[in-house]
Amino acid sequence: MPLFGNTFSPKKTPPRKSASLSNLHMLDRSSREIELGLEYGTPVMTLTGQSMRFENGQWIAESFGDTGDRREANRLRKRIQQLEEENNLLQLKIDILLDMLSETTAESHLMQKEMEELKNYSRKRK
């Protein structure tokens, strides 16, 4: 007979309470939307006086605070386009330079091979 009781027989757990006391899960979708207000619409935010909405995975500006912001945005768009064109031109130049480098490397390898063959031929003649 153990001194402090049987430690290996755990107490029975009390029965669980109902998971949800609300009957909202029994309502159909339209009733739930009316009851809980689940019509969200598109997300909208305002930063520094500029309102933007989220559509099709992108933030789209709805309104500009003043004309200075609009001019700044247009200036930045033009600058972005200019930089993209410059980037494309530089990529093209890099491609051309790499082609030229590979061509000259191939030519130099051929010339080295020809020189080795000529050396071997001249050694055989002697």
Image (cartoon, grey):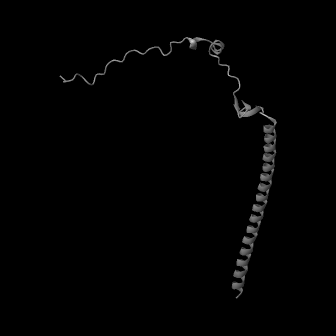
Which residue in the rendered view is the most extreme toward the bottom? 126
Is residue 55 visible in the rendered structure shown here? no
Q: Is residue 82 above or below residue 9?
A: below
Q: Is 83 located above or below residue 5 in the figure?
A: below
Q: For residue 99, what is the image quadrant?
A: bottom right
Residue in the picture at 79% in, 58% down: 93
Q: Position of residue 11 (x, y in %)?
A: 31, 19
- At which x and y percent is residue 1? 17, 22
Image quadrant holding the C terminus, namely bottom right
Residue closest to the eye, 121 or 84: 84
Name the residue located 78 percent from the left edge and 49 percent from the top edge: 84
Image quadrant in which you'd find residue 7: top left
Q: Is residue 7 left or right of residue 51?
A: left
Q: Is residue 86 visible?
A: yes
**Closest to the observer, 48 or 73:** 48
> Which quadrant of the structure image shows residue 96?
bottom right
